[in-house]
Image (tube, grey):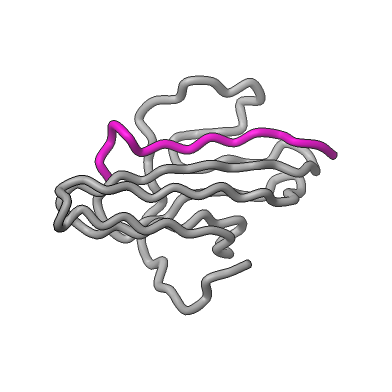
Amino acid sequence: MGYPSYSTSSNPLRYNEEVLDTSTSFNNTHFLAPKNRVYVFFWNMEANNRRLESFLQVNDQTVGRTIGDGRTAYYDSGSNLVIVRLYKNDNVKVMHDGLADGYETMISGYFLFQ
């Protein structure tokens, strides 16, 4: 699945806090696959008084998308889950087209199987 018609010309989302990283594969902007495996990624983006789109990318190719529109409800969020086969050193990141509210914005990634 891809979203080639959508602009993702933004910077990667920067995370200020890391809760758990058992493989030391995540830094504040991206995950670098340590091994050839199938992974699942879940992310949530919260928009505060604005519309916000995000794109989960693997090696700069979009594999998932969220939309949140807080313009009328003040707060709104968009979440998605993607299962993807990664190869060693594949780069996974969340790109976004605006400003995300920090407290509900997060990403989780899990190894599923080989």
Residue 89 magenta-drawn? no
Identity of the residue drawn at 53% across and 41% down: 42
Residue 35, placed above or below residue 91 = above
User: Is 60 displayed left or right of 33 in the figure?
Assistant: left
- In the picture, the quarter occupied by the C terminus is top right
Residue 113 is covered by the magenta coloring: yes
Please provide percent x and percent y for residue 6: 43, 74
The magenta-colored residue range is 100-114
Give the vertical position of 20 relative to 45 (above or below): above
Which residue lies at the image location 63% right of the left edge and 67% below the top edge? 1
Q: Position of residue 10 (x, y in %)?
A: 36, 61
Q: Is residue 88 left or right of residue 72?
A: right
Position of 66 with respect to 62 (left or right) is: left
Q: Position of residue 113 (x, y in %)?
A: 81, 37
**Up/down of 111 relative to 13, above or below:** above
Chief SS of the magenta region: strand
The spot of residue 92 in percent (x, y) is 58, 48
